[in-house]
Image (spheres, grey):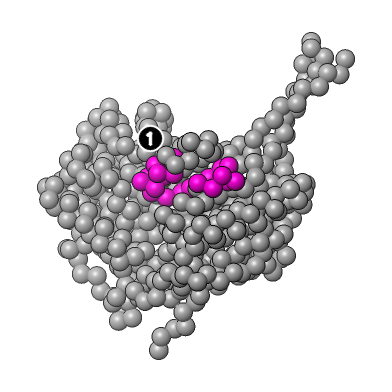
């Protein structure tokens, strides 16, 4: 029996507004349409921006604590519905339900609470110049309407990472989630209605990047854009926004390396890199897709890593024993498979996974977009799979000899988001960390994230940073006021 298809509405000026044009949204685990998403364009974006612009004077004039109180009400209600949101996030994105329950929805709650608690204490600073008889103080003033474009891999998690600081700084918002994963954003808007969040402060417009996204990025009344997504799209946003002098934060792709030295805790390293390579089906910008292993332990590492990869269960996302759910879409699955073909063309060997191991699925998931964790060896550093972002459960393993060699090889990519270093020698770890051209380096761990620390990439991985102080700086303009007191 076919499940009823959920029809989403845009959320503009506090009201759910239907859209005449709709897009199909698929459940990746079954390949079936499970939701209809508004196919918004210029008119819908203009209405949302106008609503946000009208709401800005009153919202920005509230005290930071008053704004925080609204966010905390939303956080509490979201937290009380963790199970409901986790199931919806899984069905929309393909990830295991247990992962959404343990990572995505709790982190969305944390984002709201964290910025509600921290931003009020960081909005102003001052100093005194006795020799001039003046006192200086700064104001961090909101900029107006913030345009937020969030991706499909961690839908509510990354939406709230932008939404919370934007609102706490006094901006109003027009958000455009990915058209492939809009359901939890829609459910979030219903929570906003329940807590009587001021109308027009948050507006959600659903639709495609080239239409709804383009209209938002180019709108003259939207002075800042925060985007997380592909480097291709980020580059386009930078190009079209530049003539309008918009403030941009672009968090884009990665081709992240792990550097494994022979003196590391091998079992711990393998346990973490298993997660680092394949969690969320490898669809995390921070996932490890290149593993450089020092020659003395290369064979042992490869044997053990292949063994743990083969043991990972792939299947129905509602199964608590499943580690990998479904990839986001049929077209994305085909893209990842194409890269595996590239690897073979470029002289690599597929040691396990796609094309080597059979992916056994329950009957109800036969038409879903699944792939087994895949490990490739024997590739040149300049090959396509070692240079280009695949964004799937695929990692390449290669040996290295010396510290100097591996630094140059790890940096040999246009990306620069993150890396991890595995060694018992902290001197070596710090030395390498200083030389890796990335935004974050983890030593003997991975994806340990403090919201207080700057997050972002270099080179083609992005521009700008997110985090407590960095988000505050992005979502505000600083004004200095100097007053003579003698």
- Residue 227 shown in magenta: yes
Q: Measuring from the top left, give residue 364's x and y in whole percent.
A: 33, 81
* Residue farthest top in this picture: 131
Out of 290 and 345, give the one closest to the viewer. 345
Q: Measuring from the top left, give residue 59's x and y in whole percent.
A: 73, 51
Task: Residue at 20% x, 51% y: name it.
Answer: 376
Q: Measuring from the top left, give residue 112's x and y in whole percent.
A: 63, 54
Q: Give the range drawn in magenta.
A: 218-238
* Residue farthest front in this picture: 43
Q: In this view, does 236 lie to the left or right of 346?
A: right
* Residue farthest right in this picture: 486
In the rendered view of the protein, which quadrant contains the N terminus?
bottom left
- Can I make out residue 200 in this image? yes
- Can I make out residue 156 in this image? no
> In the rendered image, which quarter is residue 47 located in?
bottom right
Q: For numbered disc 1, what is the local secondary structure?
A: helix
- Vertical placement of residue 306 versus 171, above or below: below
- Mark 1 Cα shell of 10 Å, populated few (<14), some (14-19), many (≥20): some
Q: Check disc 1 and report the residue beneath it.
A: 459
* Residue farthest bottom in this picture: 1
């Amino acid at each position: 029996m076919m499940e009823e298809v959920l029809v989403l509405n845009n959320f503009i000026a506090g009201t759910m507004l239907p859209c005449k044009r709709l897009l199909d949204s698929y459940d990746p685990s079954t390949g079936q349409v499970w939701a209809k998403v508004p196919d918004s364009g210029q008119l819908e974006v203009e209405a949302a921006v106008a609503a946000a612009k009208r709401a800005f004077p009153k919202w920005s004039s509230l005290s930071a604590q008053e704004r925080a109180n609204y966010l905390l009400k939303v956080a509490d209600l979201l937290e009380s519905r963790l199970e409901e949101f986790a199931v919806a996030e899984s069905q929309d994105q393909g990830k295991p339900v247990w992962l959404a329950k343990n990572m995505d929805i709790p982190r969305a709650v944390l984002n709201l609470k964290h910025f509600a608690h921290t931003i009020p204490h960081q909005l102003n600073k001052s100093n005194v110049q006795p020799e001039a008889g003046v006192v200086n103080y700064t104001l961090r003033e909101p900029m107006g309407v913030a345009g937020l474009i969030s991706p499909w891999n961690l839908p509510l998690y990354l939406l709230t990472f932008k939404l919370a600081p934007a609102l706490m700084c006094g901006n109003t918002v027009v958000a455009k989630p990915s058209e492939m994963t809009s359901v939890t954003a829609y459910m979030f808007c219903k929570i906003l209605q329940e807590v009587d969040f001021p109308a027009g402060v948050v507006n959600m417009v659903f639709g495609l990047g080239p239409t709804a996204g383009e209209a938002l990025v180019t709108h003259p009344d939207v002075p800042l854009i925060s985007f997380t997504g592909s480097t291709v799209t980020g580059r386009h946003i930078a190009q079209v926004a530049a003539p309008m002098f918009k403030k941009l934060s672009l968090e884009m792709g990665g081709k992240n390396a792990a550097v494994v030295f022979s003196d590391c805790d091998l079992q711990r390293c393998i346990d973490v890199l298993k997660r680092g390579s394949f969690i969320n089906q490898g669809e995390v910008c921070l996932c490890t897709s290149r593993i450089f292993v020092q020659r003395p332990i290369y064979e042992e590492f490869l044997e053990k890593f292949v063994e743990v990869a083969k043991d990972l269960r792939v299947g129905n996302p509602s199964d608590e024993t499943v580690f990998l759910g479904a990839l986001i879409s049929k077209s994305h699955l085909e893209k990842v498979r194409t890269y595996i073909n590239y690897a073979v063309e470029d002289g690599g060997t597929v040691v396990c996974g796609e094309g080597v191991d059979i992916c056994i699925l329950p009957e109800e998931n036969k038409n879903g977009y699944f792939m087994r964790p895949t490990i490739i060896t024997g590739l040149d550093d300049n090959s396509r799979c070692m240079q280009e972002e695949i964004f799937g459960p695929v990692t390449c393993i290669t040996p290295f000899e010396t510290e100097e060699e591996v630094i140059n090889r790890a940096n040999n990519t246009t990306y620069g988001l993150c890396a991890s270093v595995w060694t018992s020698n902290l001197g070596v770890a710090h030395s390498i960390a200083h030389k890796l051209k990335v935004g974050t380096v983890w030593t003997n761990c991975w994806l340990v994230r403090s919201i207080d620390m700057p997050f972002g990439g270099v080179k083609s991985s992005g521009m700008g940073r997110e985090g407590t102080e960095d988000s505050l700086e992005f979502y505000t303009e600083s004004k200095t006021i100097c007053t003579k007191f003698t």
